[in-house]
């Protein structure tokens, strides 16, 4: 079930919001205490064109990555995409910013899809999941440029590290296609739990994933524990043109 071979060259750089010396990023073992600088906080601190011109804030484009073989158009507009499938709960909060101004974009359509805890994608006849729609959904960004999905920590499948696919559409145009990644140290912890521990010996980690090597470090989710699950955040800078 390897991803189809597509051009994985880095055509855009990651979207991070930097305020003074504060970088919104996550680093391996230190993931638990990290929080992403959200658009509201940044705006209150003085973002927008003036802040960009002064050098106070820098927005850069999110890295483009391969769409992969499991994209299906016309996913349902919904927040909870689990459809009752088991797995460690994951609350995914994604923010979309205009890279030219660092301002949140309202009304952008954010489409995500990923494997379930068993490593299967829905709507794939060859996987025996035709007609099913788990782990797929679309949300529109709110006034703060944010969408929220309730899902589960993705499972693994042969040839790929753990990831979530994402697309951003604006005005009927695709303005970003990317993938979101997870620190291996956290995945190792999660995969000790059921139902993940029924499938030991995952064969690909971040360092050996061909797609992760082309910008994946800049597409790592900022993650922290929340109850029995996790919250993952990412800010994506996109160009309207």
Image (cartoon, rainbow, N blue to C red):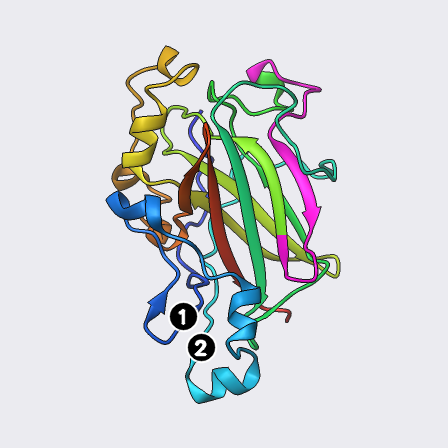
Farthest residue toward the top? 198
- Disc 2 crowd rating (10 Å Cα; few below 14, some 14-19, many 20+) is many
Specify whether 147 is left or right of 23. Answer: right
> Where residue 166 appears, x then y in whole percent?
56, 46
Taking the spot 60% from the left edge, 35% from the top edge, the residue there is: 150
Is residue 68 magenta-colored? no
Task: Quarter of the image for the N terminus: give it.
Answer: top left
Taking the spot 55% from the left edge, 65% from the top edge, the residue there is: 39
> Where residue 41 appears, x then y in whole percent?
52, 67
Using the image as rendered, state which of residue 39 and residue 60 is in the foreground.
39
| Res 97 → quadrant | bottom right
- Disc 1 crowd rating (10 Å Cα; few below 14, some 14-19, many 20+) is some
| Res 48 → quadrant | bottom right
Mark yes or no: residue 238 visible: no
Please tell me whether residue 183 is drawn above or below residue 108 in the rendered image: above
Q: Are marks 1 and 2 in contact (CB under 8 Å)?
A: yes
Magenta-tinted stretch: 127-146
Tag of residue 57 = 2
Q: Which residue is mark 1?
A: 18
Most frequent secondary structure within the magenta stretch: loop
Specify whether 234 is left or right of 217. Answer: right
> Where residue 92 appears, x then y in whole percent?
54, 42
């Amino acid at each position: 079930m390897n991803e189809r071979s597509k051009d994985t060259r880095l055509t855009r750089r990651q979207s991070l919001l930097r305020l003074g010396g504060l970088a919104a990023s996550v680093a391996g073992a230190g993931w638990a205490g990290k929080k992403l600088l959200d658009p509201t906080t940044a705006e209150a601190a003085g973002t927008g064109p003036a802040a960009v011109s002064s050098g106070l804030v820098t927005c850069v484009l999110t890295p483009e990555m391969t769409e992969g073989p499991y994209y299906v158009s016309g996913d349902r507009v919904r927040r909870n995409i689990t459809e009752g499938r088991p797995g460690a709960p994951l609350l995914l909060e994604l923010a979309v910013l205009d890279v030219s101004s660092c301002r949140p974009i309202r009304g952008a359509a954010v489409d995500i899809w990923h494997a379930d805890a068993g490593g299967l994608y829905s709507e794939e006849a060859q996987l025996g999941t035709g007609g099913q729609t788990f782990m797929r959904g679309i949300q529109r960004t709110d006034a703060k440029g944010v969408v929220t999905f309730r899902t589960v920590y993705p499972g693994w499948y042969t040839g790929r590290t753990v990831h979530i696919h994402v697309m951003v559409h604006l005005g009927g145009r695709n303005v970003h296609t990317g993938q979101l990644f997870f620190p291996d140290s956290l995945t190792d912890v999660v995969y000790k739990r059921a139902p993940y521990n029924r499938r030991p010996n995952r064969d690909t980690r971040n360092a050996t994933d061909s797609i992760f090597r082309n910008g994946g470090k800049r597409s790592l989710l900022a993650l922290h524990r929340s109850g029995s699950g996790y919250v993952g955040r990412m800010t994506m800078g996109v160009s309207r043109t």
